[in-house]
Image (cartoon, rainbow, N blue to C red):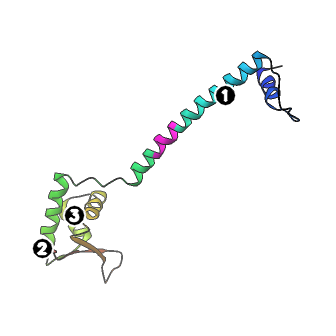
Amino acid sequence: MSDNTLLAEAINFPDAPATVLLRASDLAAIIQEVQSLREIVKEHEMRLDKHGEYIRELRFREEPKPGPKQKDRGEILKALLVANQGKMLEKDARRKMHLSETVFSKLLSRMKDSVEVQAFHSNRRMNLLVLRASKG
């Protein structure tokens, strides 16, 4: 018989008496198995803790502050909007600034407090950038 079968036989007592006599080797095998299972459980608990920390970091991650390049681009966009009476088509502003759609989209997402994006009234597929009034 294998060790697992002996261990299962040693553990499973259908009509267990109050006192059980075991061979020392069987008892040692049971104790060794329990100790190895404890170590495995501890490893899994540590992994779960690490995963929990990682999930919290992802869930509550703060947006990084804009870098100097993005700040400059934001100032340029504000200046463009001011020069055009506070309104301009998104496509035209992006072309004048020579930015790709993704870079310009990231810039607009950072500037939600000062630039509003609206659908253009005559063509809803185009977006209109509107400079918001400064608070203060």
Gap in Å between the C-alphas at discs 1 and 3? 69 Å
Q: Position of residue 129 (x, y in %)?
A: 24, 73
- Write down the residue under mark 3: 95
- Give the camera-side residue of 66 and 37: 37
User: What label sits on residue 34 in the rendered view?
Assistant: 1
Query: Where 114 falls versus 34 (above or below)?
Result: below
Residue at 29% from the left image edge and 63% from the top image edge = 109
Front disc: 2 or 3: 2
Whichever of labels 1 and 3 marks the residue nearer the N terminus, that label is: 1
Determine the secondary structure under disc 1.
helix
Write the start and end of the magenta stretch as one range: 46-52
- Write down the residue under mark 2: 82
- Give the camera-side residue of 54 and 23: 23
Front disc: 1 or 3: 1
Quadrant of the rendered image containing residue 97? bottom left
Q: Position of residue 31 (x, y in %)?
A: 68, 23
Residue at 76% from the left image edge and 16% from the top image edge = 24
Magenta stretch: dominant secondary structure? helix
Identify the amino acid type marked 3: Arg
Q: Is residue 50 magenta?
A: yes
Residue at 22% from the left image edge and 69% from the top image edge = 92
Identify the amino acid type marked 1: Val
